[in-house]
Amino acid sequence: MTLRTVALFLLVAVLILLTGLLQSWNTALYILNMGLVSAVMALGLNAQWGFAGLFNVGVMGFVALGGLATVLVSEPPVHEAWAAGGPRLIVALLLGAGTITLVVAVRNRMTKGWLRSATTIILAIGGFALYRALFDPARDAVEAVNPASTGFLGGLGLPVLLAWPAGGLLAAGAAWLIGKTALGLRSDYLAVATLGISEIIVSILKNEDWLSRGVKNVVGIPRPVPYEIDLQQDPGFVARAGDLGIDPITASTLYVKLLYTGLFATVLVVLIVLTQLALNAPWGRMMRAIRDNETAAAAMGKDVTRRHLQVFILGSAVCGIAGAMMTTLDSQLTPGTYQPLRFTFLIWVMVIVGGSGNTLGGVLGGFLIFFLWVEVEPLGQMLLNAVTMPLPDGAVKTHLLESAAHMRLLTMGVVLLVVLRFSPRGLLPER
């Protein structure tokens, strides 16, 4: 680890500490926890772009799948909904998957010609019609079960920590399906394909109420840490908080956030270690060789497409884990918040600013950019208040004060341009 690396991480630590001292420790711990989650997301994208040169702008979709996994794993099952239409939904979904499999098998086995085309069309239309005939009434029956609080099938009722690896597996499965069809595309077409597929995933979460309650959101997802109200009613905890001179409400909030910090930091450290081991192994050197010159690597006998698929699946799985962690922290799934600006553009800025191809660079970018994302708006408001103080009341002053919300977008663009101008390979370049 170089002196520059240590200095930059110390700078981030000082910024978070100053936030705690000058604003509140709750805000500082929120930045720290979301910085840890952002760093995990940046590790996933860095594996795809920094180590393999894959231009994936569908990060949002894999993060959303991680969030969905927390619902499917940790939420208790809604027995009334299962009784109303659960088995019929499962049969319909299996029928839909079987139709797709049958169509693909027929097209692979039959020779080209009008007979294959006609058979494919008949099977596809017949299978789709049968699928909708089973699916639609079952879906309506499930969504009609107490829609104010449930209206979906629920999950397995397992510990929420199991949802983190499950989120990675769900995202990895989606990445395999996407990669089998899209990784043969040129980089710009791959970007369009991944962006479109991620929008499809988010659209499904917003509209399929039987699966995720859609825009009605799933709230009260079980947590791996105690609830604040339980800590405030614990005499021992209240006594220890009093010994420290902290009121029980503040102490319980800080304690819970520190527990999340420990869990998230453990995941991040494990992923950093595994990433570094992989990069220093022959596999990592091969991936960098493919990234730098695919033609030369293919001439040496390397299966470029297969290796691209491997790293695409691994990076997407890491993003899925991060999505499950974030939903656990929020204790709710809100599909409406999955926006490309936050979950794709922002993660790309983290990787580029931190240092593409450098594991610690992605981590640094995750912390630094999320700190700016949170703090720039209030600092921008203070700056605009100072600048507009001499101005008379009117349209100009009002417009400037209302523009404080745009400061974070302006700052992200300025930071990105400055880093690309003076350090094109990021703050911590790949060695």
Image (cartoon, rainbow, N blue to C red):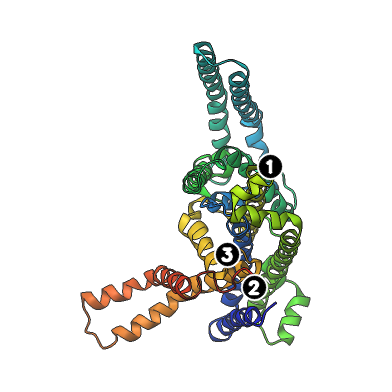
- Mark 2 closeness class: few <14, some 14–19, many ≥20 residues within 10 Å: some
Mark 3–mark 1 Cα distance, whole angstroms, equals: 42 Å
Compared with residue 140, is residue 8 higher up or lower down, i.e. above or below? below
At label 2, which amino acid type do we have? Thr
The residue carrying mark 2 is 253
Q: Which mark is residue 264?
A: none
Q: Quadrant of residue 181?
A: top right
Q: Kindly state the secondary structure of the residue where label 3 is placed.
A: loop
- Mark 1 closeness class: few <14, some 14–19, many ≥20 residues within 10 Å: some
Is 375 on the left or on the right of 90, as rendered?
Answer: left
At label 1, which amino acid type do we have? Pro
Q: Quadrant of residue 258?
A: bottom right
| Comparing labels 3 and 1, the label whose residue is closer to the camera | 3
**Which one is earlier in the sequence, the residue at label 3 or at label 1?**
1
Is 244 on the left or on the right of 189, as rendered?
Answer: right
Answer yes or no: do the residues labelled 1 and 2 have beta carbons within 8 Å? no
Q: Quadrant of residue 27?
A: bottom right
